Image (cartoon, rainbow, N blue to C red):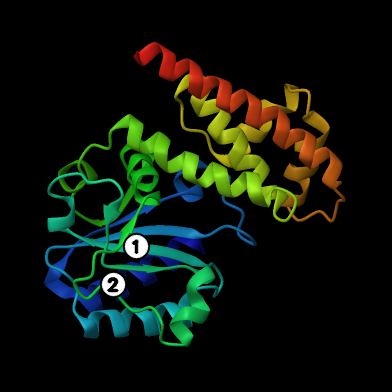
Amino acid sequence: MVDSFLVGCTEKFYEIFGENLTGVYLHGSLVLGGFVPEKSDVDLIVVTERPMSRMDAVQLTDFLLERSGSPYPIEISVLNRRQLNEWQHPCPFDYHYSEDWRNRFLEGVSTYSDGAARRDADLAAHLTIIHHSGCVLFGKPADEVFPPVPKEDYVNSILSDYEDCLENVEKDPVYSVLNILRIYYYMEDERIYSKDEAGQWALNSPFSKTVEKVLKRRRGDEISISDEELSSFKRHYQGKIEASLLEKVGRQK
């Protein structure tokens, strides 16, 4: 079912952009493993030869408002080749949609950049994952389209997400706990882990019981996780990640 969903999306992108479409690239949980059909986004990057037009944006928005969430939510960014000719961080983009932004689109607040300088630090992480294990759904090979992302920009990108996770760990424990673990393990061995891989590794940690609950909730189990244990988890890994950062800074001096 996921395959037919991806085919349908790709065909629609070609219908909208035509010969201006350079490629459609899949990243996120579908390529890293751990995709949960009831919860996970389908993560896409679309690249065009030239900047998209306002009509392109209108058609794409209409499609996403209809298709995203039926059955899988879509998170997508559209970039043009000029924005990728030389790597910049945060990376510029023409258009972004996710379910978190649905109401903005319904209210007509967000359409596309229209020449404005819009940038997204998360793209450093997304493009790193495309280089690491992404899937080309249509178009040119990723290495021909996306410039290399410096390691320090990838780290900067995931640390931005880390700050959000620290703030929201009690509110959104599944996303926050597993992403904090992914970031911790990357700081340890510079390997990119899926959420599930990071969770499985942490089953041997002092917070194995908390992580086990998080993994069960990720799979749909209604299981209680106390704010106290989440706060303890946060303090523990915040200390470890920040110690690792200080160590890396010390090595660079």
> Which amino acid lies under the numbered mark 2 shown in the image of this protein?
Phe
Q: Which residue bears the numbered disc 1?
A: 77
Is 134 rendered above or below residue 21?
above
Q: Residue at x 61, y 38 (%)?
A: 180
Q: Earlier in the sequence, mark 2 or mark 1?
A: 2
Given residues 236 and 142, the one toward you in this image is: 236
Q: Which residue bears the numbered disc 2?
A: 13
Q: Is residue 107 left or right of residue 236?
A: left
Q: Position of residue 211 (x, y in %)?
A: 75, 36
Task: Identify the image quadrant of residue 48.
Answer: bottom left
> Which amino acid lies under the numbered mark 1 shown in the image of this protein?
Ser
Residue 112: image tag = none
Task: Identify the image quadrant of residue 184.
Answer: top right
Given residues 135 and 177, the one toward you in this image is: 177
Q: Residue at x 42, y 19 (%)?
A: 249
Q: Position of residue 238 (x, y in %)?
A: 64, 31
Given residues 25 and 1, the one toward you in this image is: 25
Q: Position of residue 232 (x, y in %)?
A: 79, 34
